[in-house]
Image: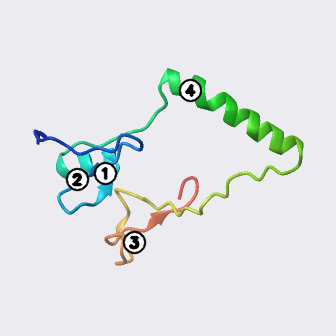
């Protein structure tokens, strides 16, 4: 595991960190770049109380006024590869000779 042991210049407002090339980046980006750490995001109890009710009220007001538009979902393609295909089902394409399964049972 890599360890950070230096004085890190961090913005007092947005908490971005300045690197050696004077580029400001997020704490997550800086730590991910310089260590083996990865991040998952959540909401702490204090921020939940502070931010979520106001955001929900705003969304409800927009919905009531007819101005609410649900977030647009990006399309996503999912490829499921059968780990044990029959020899007759191989096609030699990008799936390594295995055909993707589409739908239940195939």
Residue at image coords 88%, 41%:
64
1 with respect to 56 (left or right): left
Residue 11: where, in percent of width, then height? 34, 45
Quadrant housing the N terminus: top left
**Residue 4 appears in the figure:** yes
Q: Do the residues labelled 2 and 1 touch (CB within 8 Å)?
A: yes
Give the numbered dot on residue 33. 2
Residue under pointer 4: 48
Q: What element carries label 3?
A: helix
9 with respect to 103 (left or right): left
- N-terminal of the pair, mark 3 or mark 4, is 4
Q: Distance between the residues labelled 2 and 1?
A: 6 Å
Give the numbered dot on residue 55. none
Q: Which of marks 3 and 4 is in front?
A: 4
Q: Distance between the residues labelled 3 and 1?
A: 47 Å
Q: Is residue 48 above or below residue 68?
A: above
- N-terminal of the pair, mark 2 or mark 3, is 2
- N-terminal of the pair, mark 4 or mark 1, is 1
Residue under pointer 3: 88
Q: Is residue 77 above or below residue 10?
A: below
Q: Residue furthest front?
A: 12
Q: How far apart are marks 2 and 3 (CA)?
A: 45 Å
Q: What element carries label 4?
A: helix
96 with respect to 70 (left or right): left
Give the numbered dot on residue 29. 1
**Residue 1 appears in the figure:** no
Q: Do the residues labelled 2 and 4 touch (CB within 8 Å)?
A: no
- N-terminal of the pair, mark 3 or mark 1, is 1
Residue 45: where, in percent of width, then height? 51, 21
């Amino acid at each position: 595991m890599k360890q950070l042991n230096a004085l890190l210049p961090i913005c007092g407002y947005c908490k971005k960190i300045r690197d050696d090339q004077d580029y400001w980046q997020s704490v997550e980006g800086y730590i991910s770049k310089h260590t083996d750490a990865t991040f998952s995001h959540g909401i702490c109890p204090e921020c939940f109380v502070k931010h979520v009710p106001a955001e929900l009220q705003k969304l409800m007001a927009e919905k009531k006024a007819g101005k609410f538009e649900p977030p647009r979902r990006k399309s996503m393609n999912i490829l499921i590869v059968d780990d044990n295909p029959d020899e007759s089902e191989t096609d030699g394409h990008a799936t390594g000779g295995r055909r993707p399964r589409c739908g239940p049972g195939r």
